[in-house]
């Protein structure tokens, strides 16, 4: 059996694990990182992400004239979270993040060569529940891939890099004890199954959430969302299966709020899947009509992205068939269609300013053509009857009704035709509202009709719920120590990142303000490393 020994063992080579390792190396501690994936994927899901980080009081905010404060951010966070009376540690972590994200995340990243897009984006503004009062979503210039690459380079080039070992394709199955205390972990190498053990004075679980395990997602499906849809796409990490949650629970750790998840409403199938049911999360075009399974406009409150992502999922799951359609035209798609993640944002990912400006000015032609040519969930036609026929052919039935789709489009287009002064449609009012912020104005059409002969062809997108992030998990205190059900720290056992529901077993409560995922991974990972280093030095 292979055996490894170091001051600290970190399970998971994602952003939280890397942040913890950097703190430990700064303190001169020896570190072993065990990652189930291959070396090319070090950095985990953060490496694939768009790279948005929730920051309060940034230079980008000040230069854009945004007045923000930790107190305002914490108030917004608590409003969206709807914490319960027993959510002590989730609330403490929310307060910690809103007050520390500037020095401990933003400034820390900038000191390590990470830059940000100059205009913060304004997402999760809130619909029936107030959300972000001001724009706080800061996009890393280079996406999440740049974030991972830069921090990995810091690991590899660290003055104490000789004290770091990283083992890939190592699946951890359980935790080990000695004399009643946590002493390490054990598992098997993949794919050959060779067993290993890793021992350390302290152990950090940073292995992600449960949302890559769709069966587990179904088991913990939130009551607000009725029953799990027949199709749930996987937008999480393929190894985020909850295996380490079970291992921690077996050692007495408290696991909370697994029914709280951050799923998305506009998932489509990836045509080059890297895991079963691989789904892409679209940024739903605001000027598209969001229709239910039979082509009726979902209402009476129309669905519009950017206000309350959880509400979108709730509304679609309340339908008889829990998938939806968005109907738009090519002009809308060119300006508004986007796919979340580094893979489909190459101009930002590769830091190509001219290409980014080209796409802003002339539209994402390459992306629209790629989706139309490859994604099975996109259909295109020159007329509405032909489009509906193709929608039904794709689904394999006659569920979509031409009369329902026609009525929805004609009513909407007639509202636009009357002129802005007479708009009496909530979707149009929201479009007018979001266009007041420059970060949204450049990506949102100004009252674009659907049946516009100059904007054809028509496009319909079949969209499914896509599983993404776990908002619950291993309960931890502000030192990232794992707690038992009585609230007592388990000696030598720590956890960070999504495994902890981004802090405390669920720091986001019921909803997330977006951009808080990467930031919380950094903060909780750093807290774990600092806590271990402080403990080891006393």
Image (spheres, rainbow, N blue to C red):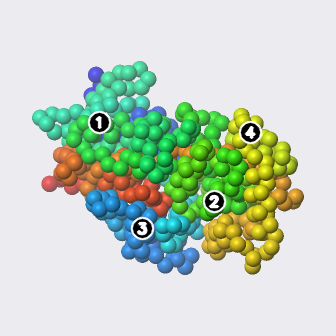
Dots 1, 2 in contact, CB < 8 A: no
Q: Which residue is mark 2?
A: 299
Front of the two marks 1 and 4: 4
Q: Position of residue 5 (x, y in %)?
A: 25, 35
Image height check: is 254 above or below 527? above
Q: Residue 44 vs residue 445: left or right? A: left
Pointer 3 and pointer 4: residues touching (CB < 8 Å)?
Answer: no
The residue under label 4 is 398
Q: Give me the residue at 52% from left, 53% from top.
A: 314
Q: Which mark is residue 269?
A: none
Residue in front for this viewpoint, 323 or 57: 323
- Mark 1 or 2, nearer chain start: 1
Q: Could you say which quadrant of the image residue 230 lies in?
A: top right
- Element type at marker 1? helix
Left or right: residue 152 compared with residue 328: left
Frontmost residue, 151 versus 468: 468
Earlier-in-chain disc, 1 versus 4: 1
């Amino acid at each position: 059996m292979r055996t490894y020994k170091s001051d600290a063992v970190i399970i998971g080579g994602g952003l939280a694990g890397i942040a913890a390792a950097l703190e430990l190396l700064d303190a001169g501690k020896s570190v072993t990182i065990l990652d189930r994936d291959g070396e090319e994927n070090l950095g985990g899901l953060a490496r694939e992400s768009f790279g948005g980080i929730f920051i309060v009081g940034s230079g980008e905010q000040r230069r854009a004239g945004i007045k923000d404060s930790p107190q305002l951010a914490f108030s917004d966070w608590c409003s969206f979270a709807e914490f319960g009376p027993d959510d002590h540690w989730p609330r403490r972590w929310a307060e910690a993040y809103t007050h520390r994200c500037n020095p401990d995340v933003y400034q820390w990243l900038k000191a390590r060569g990470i830059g940000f897009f100059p205009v913060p984006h304004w997402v999760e503004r809130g619909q029936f529940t107030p959300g972000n009062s001001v724009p706080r979503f800061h996009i890393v210039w280079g996406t999440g891939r740049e974030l991972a690459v830069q921090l990995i380079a810091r690991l590899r080039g660290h003055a104490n890099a000789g004290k770091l070992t990283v083992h890939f394709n190592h699946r951890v199955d359980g935790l080990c004890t000695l004399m009643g205390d946590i002493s390490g972990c054990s598992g098997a190498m993949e794919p050959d199954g060779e067993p290993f053990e890793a021992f350390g004075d302290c152990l950090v679980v940073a292995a992600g959430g449960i949302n890559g395990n769709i069966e587990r997602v179904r088991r913990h499906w939130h009551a607000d969302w009725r029953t799990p849809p027949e199709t749930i796409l996987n937008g999480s990490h393929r190894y985020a299966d909850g295996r380490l949650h079970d291992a921690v629970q077996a050692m007495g750790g408290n696991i909370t709020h697994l029914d709280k998840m951050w799923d998305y409403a506009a998932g489509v199938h990836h045509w080059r899947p890297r895991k079963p049911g691989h789904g892409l999360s679209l940024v739903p075009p605001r000027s598209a009509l969001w229709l239910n399974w039979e082509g009726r406009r979902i209402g009476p409150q129309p669905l519009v992205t950017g206000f309350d992502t959880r509400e979108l999922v709730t509304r679609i799951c309340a339908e008889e068939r829990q998938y939806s359609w968005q109907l738009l035209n090519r002009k809308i798609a060119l300006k508004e269609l986007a796919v979340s993640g580094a893979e489909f944002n190459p101009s930002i990912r590769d830091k190509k300013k001219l290409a980014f400006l080209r796409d802003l000015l002339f539209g994402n032609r390459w992306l629209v053509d790629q989706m139309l040519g490859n994604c099975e969930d996109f259909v295109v036609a020159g007329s509405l009857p032909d489009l509906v026929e193709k929608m039904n052919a794709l689904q394999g039935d006659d569920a979509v009704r031409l009369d329902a789709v026609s009525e929805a489009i004609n009513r909407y287009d007639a509202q636009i035709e009357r002129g802005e002064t007479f708009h009496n449609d909530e979707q149009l009012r929201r479009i007018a509202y979001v266009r007041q912020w420059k970060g949204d104005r450049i990506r949102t059409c100004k009252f674009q009709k659907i049946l516009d002969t100059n904007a054809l062809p028509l496009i319909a997108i079949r969209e499914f719920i896509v599983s993404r992030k776990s908002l619950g998990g291993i309960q931890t205190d502000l030192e990232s120590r794992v707690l038992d059900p009585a609230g007592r720290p388990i000696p030598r056992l720590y956890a960070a990142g999504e495994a902890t529901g981004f802090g405390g077993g669920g720091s986001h409560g019921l909803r997330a303000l977006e951009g808080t995922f990467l930031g919380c991974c950094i903060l909780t990972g750093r807290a774990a490393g600092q806590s271990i280093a402080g403990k080891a030095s006393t």
